[in-house]
Image (cartoon, rainbow, N blue to C red):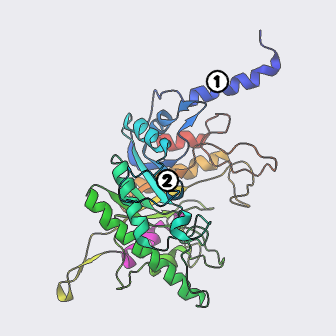
Amino acid sequence: MLPARSLPSLLAVLALALVAASPAHGADITRKKAMWGPLIKDNQSLMPVYAELGVGIFETRLSWREAAPTRPADPRDPSDPAYAWRGPIDYAINEAQKYGIEVLVNVSFTPTWASGSDAPFRAPRRTKDFVNFMEAAARHYPEVKYWMIWGEPNRTTGFSPATTTSAPESKQKKQRARFYAKMLDETYVRLKKISRSNIIIGGNSYDAAGVAPGFQPARQWIRNLKLRNGKPPRMDLYGHNPFSSRPPALSQRPRSRNGLDFADTDDLLKEVNRHLRQTKGKGKRKRKGKKLKVFLSEYSLPTDQDNDVFPDFFVSRETQAQWIRDALQITRRTKGIYSLGYFKLFDEPPSDTREEPLWGLITNDGVRKPGFFAWRDG
Protein backbone atom coordinates (compact mmCIF):
# COMPACT_ATOMS: atom_id res chain seq x y z
CA MET A 1 0.00 0.00 0.00
CA LEU A 2 1.34 3.46 -0.96
CA PRO A 3 1.81 5.99 1.84
CA ALA A 4 -0.71 8.86 1.71
CA ARG A 5 1.96 11.42 0.84
CA SER A 6 2.69 9.48 -2.41
CA LEU A 7 -0.85 9.84 -3.76
CA PRO A 8 -0.53 13.44 -5.11
CA SER A 9 2.58 12.60 -7.11
CA LEU A 10 0.99 9.40 -8.40
CA LEU A 11 -2.13 11.26 -9.45
CA ALA A 12 0.00 13.84 -11.25
CA VAL A 13 1.80 11.10 -13.20
CA LEU A 14 -1.52 9.48 -14.14
CA ALA A 15 -2.90 12.84 -15.24
CA LEU A 16 0.07 13.44 -17.54
CA ALA A 17 -0.29 9.96 -18.98
CA LEU A 18 -3.91 10.73 -19.82
CA VAL A 19 -2.85 14.01 -21.46
CA ALA A 20 -0.53 12.13 -23.83
CA ALA A 21 -2.95 9.29 -24.53
CA SER A 22 -4.39 8.86 -28.00
CA PRO A 23 -7.66 10.80 -28.38
CA ALA A 24 -10.87 8.78 -28.39
CA HIS A 25 -13.19 11.64 -29.25
CA GLY A 26 -11.21 14.37 -30.93
CA ALA A 27 -12.33 17.30 -33.03
CA ASP A 28 -12.04 17.40 -36.80
CA ILE A 29 -8.58 18.54 -37.91
CA THR A 30 -8.85 22.02 -39.42
CA ARG A 31 -6.33 24.61 -40.60
CA LYS A 32 -8.51 27.21 -38.87
CA LYS A 33 -6.81 26.05 -35.66
CA ALA A 34 -3.06 26.36 -35.07
CA MET A 35 -1.02 26.03 -31.88
CA TRP A 36 2.37 26.66 -30.33
CA GLY A 37 3.48 24.14 -27.73
CA PRO A 38 5.92 21.37 -26.81
CA LEU A 39 6.39 18.20 -28.82
CA ILE A 40 6.83 15.80 -25.93
CA LYS A 41 6.12 15.64 -22.23
CA ASP A 42 7.36 12.87 -19.97
CA ASN A 43 8.77 11.05 -23.01
CA GLN A 44 5.33 10.96 -24.64
CA SER A 45 4.47 12.54 -27.98
CA LEU A 46 1.92 15.31 -27.61
CA MET A 47 0.80 15.23 -31.23
CA PRO A 48 -2.22 13.05 -30.30
CA VAL A 49 -3.33 15.86 -27.98
CA TYR A 50 -3.04 18.45 -30.75
CA ALA A 51 -5.05 16.13 -32.98
CA GLU A 52 -7.70 15.77 -30.29
CA LEU A 53 -7.94 19.55 -30.17
CA GLY A 54 -8.49 19.67 -33.94
CA VAL A 55 -5.24 21.57 -34.54
CA GLY A 56 -4.44 21.56 -38.26
CA ILE A 57 -1.19 23.54 -38.07
CA PHE A 58 1.50 22.92 -35.47
CA GLU A 59 3.72 26.00 -35.05
CA THR A 60 7.41 25.72 -34.21
CA ARG A 61 10.58 27.77 -34.56
CA LEU A 62 13.84 27.29 -36.44
CA SER A 63 16.76 29.39 -35.21
CA TRP A 64 19.00 30.44 -38.10
CA ARG A 65 21.61 31.19 -35.43
CA GLU A 66 21.59 27.59 -34.17
CA ALA A 67 21.27 25.94 -37.57
CA ALA A 68 24.17 27.88 -39.08
CA PRO A 69 26.63 28.71 -36.26
CA THR A 70 29.41 29.21 -38.83
CA ARG A 71 29.22 30.57 -42.35
CA PRO A 72 28.52 27.75 -44.85
CA ALA A 73 30.69 27.46 -47.95
CA ASP A 74 27.61 26.71 -50.06
CA PRO A 75 24.74 28.33 -48.14
CA ARG A 76 22.02 27.14 -50.54
CA ASP A 77 22.98 23.49 -50.06
CA PRO A 78 21.34 21.95 -46.95
CA SER A 79 24.07 19.28 -46.81
CA ASP A 80 26.83 21.85 -46.30
CA PRO A 81 28.80 20.70 -43.22
CA ALA A 82 28.31 24.08 -41.52
CA TYR A 83 24.60 23.35 -41.04
CA ALA A 84 23.33 21.76 -37.85
CA TRP A 85 19.67 21.02 -38.49
CA ARG A 86 17.41 20.60 -35.47
CA GLY A 87 16.15 17.12 -34.74
CA PRO A 88 12.90 18.30 -33.09
CA ILE A 89 11.56 19.66 -36.38
CA ASP A 90 12.08 16.30 -38.08
CA TYR A 91 10.29 14.67 -35.14
CA ALA A 92 7.44 17.19 -35.40
CA ILE A 93 7.04 16.50 -39.12
CA ASN A 94 6.99 12.74 -38.63
CA GLU A 95 4.50 12.90 -35.76
CA ALA A 96 2.26 15.47 -37.46
CA GLN A 97 1.98 13.40 -40.63
CA LYS A 98 0.36 10.58 -38.64
CA TYR A 99 -2.63 12.82 -37.93
CA GLY A 100 -2.85 14.97 -41.05
CA ILE A 101 -1.41 18.01 -39.25
CA GLU A 102 0.77 20.53 -41.11
CA VAL A 103 3.92 22.01 -39.59
CA LEU A 104 4.60 25.75 -39.71
CA VAL A 105 8.20 26.89 -39.24
CA ASN A 106 8.97 30.38 -37.97
CA VAL A 107 12.55 31.33 -38.92
CA SER A 108 14.28 33.96 -36.75
CA PHE A 109 17.55 34.88 -34.99
CA THR A 110 20.67 35.85 -36.90
CA PRO A 111 24.07 34.16 -36.47
CA THR A 112 26.92 36.44 -35.49
CA TRP A 113 28.76 35.88 -38.77
CA ALA A 114 25.77 37.30 -40.68
CA SER A 115 25.03 40.29 -38.45
CA GLY A 116 28.36 41.19 -36.88
CA SER A 117 26.60 41.23 -33.51
CA ASP A 118 26.13 38.83 -30.60
CA ALA A 119 22.50 39.91 -30.31
CA PRO A 120 20.24 37.25 -31.91
CA PHE A 121 17.62 39.83 -32.89
CA ARG A 122 20.12 41.87 -34.93
CA ALA A 123 19.15 41.67 -38.59
CA PRO A 124 21.65 40.32 -41.13
CA ARG A 125 23.83 42.85 -42.87
CA ARG A 126 22.81 41.35 -46.23
CA THR A 127 19.35 40.07 -47.03
CA LYS A 128 21.00 37.60 -49.40
CA ASP A 129 22.44 35.61 -46.47
CA PHE A 130 18.97 35.04 -45.01
CA VAL A 131 17.45 34.17 -48.37
CA ASN A 132 20.16 31.59 -49.04
CA PHE A 133 19.53 30.02 -45.65
CA MET A 134 15.79 29.89 -46.35
CA GLU A 135 16.46 28.00 -49.57
CA ALA A 136 18.59 25.48 -47.69
CA ALA A 137 15.90 25.10 -45.01
CA ALA A 138 13.14 24.59 -47.56
CA ARG A 139 15.21 21.95 -49.34
CA HIS A 140 16.06 20.22 -46.06
CA TYR A 141 12.41 20.18 -44.93
CA PRO A 142 10.46 19.60 -48.18
CA GLU A 143 7.43 18.42 -46.17
CA VAL A 144 7.02 21.91 -44.67
CA LYS A 145 4.91 24.31 -46.71
CA TYR A 146 4.21 27.07 -44.14
CA TRP A 147 7.16 29.43 -43.68
CA MET A 148 6.86 32.38 -41.30
CA ILE A 149 9.50 35.01 -42.00
CA TRP A 150 10.73 36.23 -38.62
CA GLY A 151 8.80 36.68 -35.38
CA GLU A 152 7.51 40.11 -34.37
CA PRO A 153 9.94 42.20 -36.45
CA ASN A 154 8.07 45.39 -35.50
CA ARG A 155 9.68 45.10 -32.05
CA THR A 156 13.17 46.50 -31.53
CA THR A 157 14.03 43.34 -29.59
CA GLY A 158 12.67 41.22 -32.43
CA PHE A 159 14.38 42.63 -35.52
CA SER A 160 16.92 45.42 -35.54
CA PRO A 161 18.95 46.21 -38.66
CA ALA A 162 21.74 48.74 -38.57
CA THR A 163 20.42 52.25 -39.19
CA THR A 164 21.86 55.73 -39.15
CA THR A 165 21.72 56.55 -35.46
CA SER A 166 21.58 60.29 -36.13
CA ALA A 167 18.43 59.94 -38.23
CA PRO A 168 15.06 60.81 -36.65
CA GLU A 169 13.32 57.85 -35.06
CA SER A 170 10.49 58.00 -37.60
CA LYS A 171 13.00 57.60 -40.43
CA GLN A 172 14.76 54.73 -38.67
CA LYS A 173 11.42 52.94 -38.30
CA LYS A 174 10.76 53.26 -42.02
CA GLN A 175 14.28 52.03 -42.80
CA ARG A 176 13.74 48.98 -40.61
CA ALA A 177 10.40 48.18 -42.21
CA ARG A 178 11.88 48.65 -45.68
CA PHE A 179 14.81 46.33 -44.92
CA TYR A 180 12.42 43.66 -43.66
CA ALA A 181 10.17 44.14 -46.70
CA LYS A 182 13.14 43.57 -49.01
CA MET A 183 14.15 40.42 -47.13
CA LEU A 184 10.59 39.11 -47.18
CA ASP A 185 10.08 39.79 -50.88
CA GLU A 186 13.36 38.13 -51.88
CA THR A 187 12.54 35.12 -49.70
CA TYR A 188 9.11 34.83 -51.32
CA VAL A 189 10.63 34.69 -54.79
CA ARG A 190 13.25 32.11 -53.79
CA LEU A 191 10.84 29.77 -51.95
CA LYS A 192 8.29 29.89 -54.76
CA LYS A 193 11.01 28.79 -57.18
CA ILE A 194 11.65 25.76 -55.00
CA SER A 195 7.94 24.89 -54.73
CA ARG A 196 4.81 26.78 -55.70
CA SER A 197 3.08 25.07 -52.78
CA ASN A 198 5.25 26.93 -50.24
CA ILE A 199 3.12 29.42 -48.30
CA ILE A 200 5.03 32.49 -47.10
CA ILE A 201 3.71 34.35 -44.08
CA GLY A 202 5.05 37.89 -43.74
CA GLY A 203 4.66 40.97 -41.57
CA ASN A 204 4.22 38.96 -38.37
CA SER A 205 3.52 41.98 -36.21
CA TYR A 206 2.99 42.04 -32.50
CA ASP A 207 0.00 43.91 -31.16
CA ALA A 208 0.63 46.67 -28.69
CA ALA A 209 -0.14 50.34 -28.46
CA GLY A 210 3.10 50.98 -26.60
CA VAL A 211 5.49 53.85 -27.17
CA ALA A 212 8.78 52.12 -26.35
CA PRO A 213 11.71 53.52 -28.36
CA GLY A 214 11.96 51.85 -31.75
CA PHE A 215 8.72 49.89 -31.37
CA GLN A 216 6.34 50.21 -34.32
CA PRO A 217 2.66 49.67 -33.49
CA ALA A 218 0.99 47.24 -35.85
CA ARG A 219 -0.85 49.84 -37.97
CA GLN A 220 2.31 51.89 -38.44
CA TRP A 221 4.34 48.78 -39.28
CA ILE A 222 1.86 47.72 -41.96
CA ARG A 223 1.91 51.17 -43.55
CA ASN A 224 5.72 51.26 -43.54
CA LEU A 225 6.15 47.85 -45.20
CA LYS A 226 7.24 49.08 -48.62
CA LEU A 227 9.97 48.18 -51.07
CA ARG A 228 12.26 50.82 -52.46
CA ASN A 229 9.93 51.26 -55.46
CA GLY A 230 6.98 51.92 -53.16
CA LYS A 231 5.29 48.57 -53.76
CA PRO A 232 4.39 46.16 -50.96
CA PRO A 233 6.51 43.03 -50.48
CA ARG A 234 5.06 39.78 -51.79
CA MET A 235 3.59 37.28 -49.34
CA ASP A 236 0.77 34.72 -49.25
CA LEU A 237 -0.57 35.57 -45.79
CA TYR A 238 -0.08 38.42 -43.35
CA GLY A 239 0.93 37.20 -39.89
CA HIS A 240 -0.11 38.94 -36.69
CA ASN A 241 -0.06 38.17 -32.95
CA PRO A 242 -3.35 39.63 -31.65
CA PHE A 243 -2.78 39.40 -27.89
CA SER A 244 -5.65 41.04 -26.10
CA SER A 245 -6.96 41.84 -22.62
CA ARG A 246 -10.57 42.32 -23.69
CA PRO A 247 -13.34 40.07 -25.03
CA PRO A 248 -12.94 39.03 -28.69
CA ALA A 249 -15.92 40.96 -30.06
CA LEU A 250 -15.47 42.78 -33.39
CA SER A 251 -18.27 45.18 -32.51
CA GLN A 252 -15.99 47.03 -30.08
CA ARG A 253 -14.30 50.28 -30.92
CA PRO A 254 -10.56 50.14 -31.67
CA ARG A 255 -8.63 49.84 -28.43
CA SER A 256 -6.15 52.48 -29.55
CA ARG A 257 -5.15 54.46 -32.60
CA ASN A 258 -2.24 52.20 -33.47
CA GLY A 259 -2.74 48.86 -31.71
CA LEU A 260 -4.57 45.94 -33.30
CA ASP A 261 -5.74 43.25 -30.88
CA PHE A 262 -8.10 40.36 -31.64
CA ALA A 263 -11.18 42.56 -31.33
CA ASP A 264 -9.67 44.77 -34.05
CA THR A 265 -9.31 41.96 -36.59
CA ASP A 266 -11.77 43.64 -38.95
CA ASP A 267 -9.56 46.76 -38.87
CA LEU A 268 -6.47 44.60 -39.34
CA LEU A 269 -7.93 43.14 -42.53
CA LYS A 270 -8.72 46.63 -43.82
CA GLU A 271 -5.21 47.91 -43.08
CA VAL A 272 -3.52 44.88 -44.65
CA ASN A 273 -5.54 45.05 -47.85
CA ARG A 274 -5.32 48.81 -48.11
CA HIS A 275 -1.54 48.91 -47.86
CA LEU A 276 -0.18 45.43 -48.72
CA ARG A 277 -2.48 44.08 -51.41
CA GLN A 278 -0.62 43.35 -54.61
CA THR A 279 -1.41 45.20 -57.83
CA LYS A 280 -1.16 43.86 -61.36
CA GLY A 281 -0.71 45.64 -64.67
CA LYS A 282 0.19 49.25 -65.36
CA GLY A 283 -1.61 52.47 -66.12
CA LYS A 284 -5.30 52.04 -66.91
CA ARG A 285 -4.88 48.27 -66.75
CA LYS A 286 -3.60 48.43 -63.20
CA ARG A 287 -5.78 46.43 -60.81
CA LYS A 288 -5.54 44.96 -57.37
CA GLY A 289 -4.94 41.25 -56.93
CA LYS A 290 -6.90 39.02 -54.58
CA LYS A 291 -7.19 40.03 -50.96
CA LEU A 292 -4.66 38.87 -48.40
CA LYS A 293 -5.86 36.73 -45.51
CA VAL A 294 -4.38 37.02 -42.03
CA PHE A 295 -2.73 34.29 -39.99
CA LEU A 296 -3.35 35.11 -36.32
CA SER A 297 -0.36 33.21 -35.02
CA GLU A 298 -0.40 33.84 -31.26
CA TYR A 299 -3.45 34.37 -29.06
CA SER A 300 -3.29 33.58 -25.36
CA LEU A 301 -5.38 34.09 -22.24
CA PRO A 302 -3.58 33.63 -18.89
CA THR A 303 -5.71 32.44 -15.98
CA ASP A 304 -5.82 32.42 -12.20
CA GLN A 305 -3.02 34.84 -11.22
CA ASP A 306 -1.06 37.91 -12.23
CA ASN A 307 2.06 37.15 -14.28
CA ASP A 308 5.28 38.72 -15.47
CA VAL A 309 4.42 38.47 -19.19
CA PHE A 310 1.03 40.23 -19.16
CA PRO A 311 1.14 42.37 -16.00
CA ASP A 312 -2.25 43.08 -14.44
CA PHE A 313 -4.07 40.81 -16.86
CA PHE A 314 -5.52 37.39 -16.22
CA VAL A 315 -8.99 35.86 -16.37
CA SER A 316 -10.85 33.05 -14.68
CA ARG A 317 -10.75 29.62 -16.27
CA GLU A 318 -14.41 29.98 -17.21
CA THR A 319 -13.75 33.32 -18.90
CA GLN A 320 -10.79 31.83 -20.76
CA ALA A 321 -13.11 29.14 -22.12
CA GLN A 322 -15.81 31.61 -23.14
CA TRP A 323 -13.38 33.94 -24.92
CA ILE A 324 -11.84 30.97 -26.73
CA ARG A 325 -15.29 29.88 -27.93
CA ASP A 326 -16.02 33.40 -29.14
CA ALA A 327 -12.64 33.78 -30.85
CA LEU A 328 -13.00 30.47 -32.69
CA GLN A 329 -16.52 31.34 -33.78
CA ILE A 330 -15.23 34.59 -35.28
CA THR A 331 -12.33 32.73 -36.91
CA ARG A 332 -14.61 30.18 -38.56
CA ARG A 333 -17.07 32.71 -39.94
CA THR A 334 -14.52 35.29 -41.11
CA LYS A 335 -13.15 34.37 -44.55
CA GLY A 336 -10.27 36.78 -44.13
CA ILE A 337 -8.87 34.84 -41.15
CA TYR A 338 -6.80 31.94 -42.43
CA SER A 339 -6.03 30.47 -39.01
CA LEU A 340 -6.00 31.25 -35.29
CA GLY A 341 -3.03 30.01 -33.29
CA TYR A 342 -3.11 29.51 -29.52
CA PHE A 343 -0.02 30.08 -27.37
CA LYS A 344 0.56 27.68 -25.42
CA LEU A 345 -0.69 24.19 -24.62
CA PHE A 346 0.62 24.02 -21.01
CA ASP A 347 0.93 26.46 -18.14
CA GLU A 348 4.46 27.40 -17.19
CA PRO A 349 5.93 25.46 -14.23
CA PRO A 350 5.82 27.12 -10.79
CA SER A 351 8.44 29.78 -10.17
CA ASP A 352 9.85 31.24 -6.96
CA THR A 353 8.05 34.53 -7.59
CA ARG A 354 4.72 32.86 -8.39
CA GLU A 355 4.40 35.16 -11.39
CA GLU A 356 4.63 32.54 -14.13
CA PRO A 357 1.97 32.87 -16.86
CA LEU A 358 -0.76 30.25 -16.58
CA TRP A 359 -1.74 30.68 -20.22
CA GLY A 360 -2.09 27.02 -21.16
CA LEU A 361 -5.17 24.95 -21.86
CA ILE A 362 -3.70 22.35 -19.51
CA THR A 363 -2.12 22.96 -16.10
CA ASN A 364 1.52 22.10 -15.59
CA ASP A 365 0.52 18.93 -13.72
CA GLY A 366 -1.82 17.72 -16.45
CA VAL A 367 -5.31 18.96 -15.53
CA ARG A 368 -7.36 20.06 -18.54
CA LYS A 369 -8.98 23.45 -18.05
CA PRO A 370 -12.42 24.34 -19.42
CA GLY A 371 -10.51 26.20 -22.14
CA PHE A 372 -9.15 22.88 -23.43
CA PHE A 373 -12.66 21.62 -24.18
CA ALA A 374 -13.71 25.02 -25.54
CA TRP A 375 -10.81 24.89 -28.03
CA ARG A 376 -11.51 21.26 -28.90
CA ASP A 377 -15.22 21.81 -29.52
CA GLY A 378 -15.03 25.33 -30.94
Residue 332 within the magenta-colored segment of the rendering: no
Residue 319: x percent and y percent? 63, 50
Which residue is nearer to you in this view: 33 or 159?
A: 159
The majority secondary structure of the magenta stretch comes to helix
- What label sits on residue 67 in the rendered view? 2
- Tell me: residue 14, above or below residue 121: above
Q: How many marks?
A: 2
Tag 2's secondary structure? helix
Circle 2: residue type: Ala
**Left or right: 197 as drawn, with respect to 70:** left
The range drawn in magenta is 262-277
Residue farthest toward the top in the current orientation of the protein: 1
Closer to us: 344 or 106: 106
Question: Residue 262: where, in percent of width, then height?
Answer: 52, 63
**Mark 1 crowd level (few <14, some 14–19, many ≥20, 10 Å Cα):** few
According to the picture, the residue beneath numbered tag 1 turns out to be 14
**Picture layout, residue 172 above or below residue 304:** below
Q: Quadrant of residue 13?
A: top right
Sequence-wise first label, 1 or 2: 1
Residue 263 drawn in magenta? yes
Q: Is residue 35 left or right of residue 334?
A: right
Name the residue located 73 percent from the left edge and 55 percent from the top edge.
307
Q: Position of residue 346 (x, y in %)?
A: 61, 42
Is residue 337 shown to the viewer in this render? no
**Horizontal arrangement in the rendering, residue 28 relative to residue 115 (left or right):** left
Crowding around mark 2 (Cα neighbors within 10 Å: few <14, some 14 to 19, many 20+) is: some
Q: Which amino acid lies under the numbered mark 1 shown in the image of this protein?
A: Leu
Q: At numbered mark 1, what does the secondary structure look like: helix, strand or loop?
A: helix
Q: Residue at x 66, y 76 (%)?
A: 212
| Residue contact between numbered discs 1 and 2, judged by CB atoms under 8 Å | no
Q: Is residue 57 above or below residue 294?
A: above
Find residue 191 and report its image quarter. Answer: bottom left
